[in-house]
Image: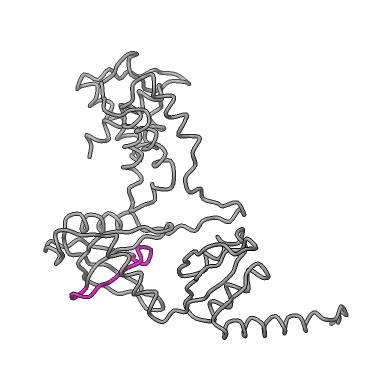
Amino acid sequence: MRADRLVSLVLLLRQRGRMTADTLARELEVSTRTVLRDIEALSAAGVPVYAERGRHGGFSLLPGFRTELTGLNHEEALALLTAGSGRGEQAFGLGSALASAMRKVVDALPESHRTTASDAARRFLVEPETDLLSRRVATEEVPAATMTEIRRAVLAGHRLRIHYAAADQEPRWRTVDPIGLVTVRDRGYLLATRSGADRTYRLSRISAAEELPEPAQRPDQVDLDRIWRERCARFLSSGHVAVLVRVAPERREELLSTAVAVRTAEPDADGRLRLEATFQDLRHAEWALWQLGADAEALSPESLRTSLRDRATAMAARYATSQYLAR
C-alpha cells in the first residue's frame, strides 16, 4: 500500500511540478505528516525530491528526473483516460485506485504524447452528474469500510456477513456466498447465494459487512453477464406489470428514470417511440405516465388506459370553470 502511495507521490510531482505538503495530502488522501514521512523515504531511496521554502514553496523533483515506462500508444492512453474521466470512481469504492492508475497512465506516455492525450481526454465527458434538464443524477453512497470488506470477500472467494435492510424491513445480519459485483445506472448490486438460493442485494442497503475466513460455496468460473440477465428476467416476471407506451423522444429519459425496466422498439410513423416498460404495479404505471402528460400514451393494458382517462376527466372537470372561490 505504501509503495503504491510513494509511486503516486512521485508521479504527482513529475506531472504537476512543485506541490505543497497539504496539496499532496489531499490528493493522496492521507495526513500531511504521512506525506512528510514519504518525502523523507523517497530522499533516502535516492529519489531527488527537494523542498523550497517561502510563500510559494513546496516539494519538487530535480528537472529531468524520469523513470521510463513504455507500452501505451496515444489511442490506448486516450481510451483509458476517457474511461477514468467519468463517474467510474464511484464504482465499488475504487476511487483512490482509479486516480492512482490514471496518474500512471499519463506517466507511461512518451513526452511528446502526454500533454496531447490529457488535453484530448478533457474533450470527452462521460456520464455527468446532471442531464440537460438540470436534474441531478442520484448516486448511492456505500460506506468505504463496508465496500472494502465486500470487495475483498468477492475477490478472495470468502463468505460474507452483511447488515442488510430489505425494502420495508428492519436491517438484519445475513451470511452469504458472494459471486460478483454489478453496477447499473449508478446503482451497485452484490450477486450472491444464501443457503444455496440466488440472492441480489442493493449495495446502498448494506450498512456494514464482514469478510469471513471460510471459503464461499461458489463455482470457480462465473459468467456475470449471463447471471445478471437471468436474474433480471426472473425479477421482471414476478408481480410486475408490462405496459406498451408511445412516448415523445425527448421524454424517454424521464420514462427510464421511473420505470423498473424499458425495452425499446422501432419509432412510429409520427416519430414517437413505442416502448415496452415494466412497472411495479398499475398504480406505479399510472403515476409515471401521468407525469409525462400528453407526451406519452399507454396503449395497453386497457385497465391502465381506463384509469388514466378517468383521472384526466376528473381533472378537466375540476378546471372547467374559471371562477375562483375565495375562502
Residue 35's x, y, as percent?
31, 32
Residue at 47% x, 31% y is 120
The magenta span reads 194-206
Q: Position of residue 289 (x, y in %)?
A: 60, 73
Quarter of the image with the C terminus in it: bottom right
- Say if the magenta span includes residue 196: yes
Nearer to the camera, 8 or 157? 157
- 198 lies above or below 94: below
Residue 279 in the image, given as x and y percentages of width and height: 48, 75
Q: Is residue 119 left or right of residue 25?
A: right
- The percent coordinates of residue 7 (x first, y second) are 27, 30
* Residue at image point 22% right, 54% down: 152
- What count of labels does the image hold? 0
Q: Quick one: 92 or 62, which is closer to the camera?
A: 92
The answer to which image quadrant residue 297 occupies is bottom right
Residue 142 position (above or below residue 298): above
**Image quadrant containing the N terminus:** top left
Q: Residue at x 36, y 60 (%)?
A: 188
Q: Residue reaching furthest right?
A: 323
Displayed quadrant of residue 232: bottom left
Please tell me which residue is depicted at 36% across the width and 66% down the height of the picture: 202
In which quarter of the view is residue 73 placed?
top left
| Residue 190 shown left or right of residue 297 in the figure | left
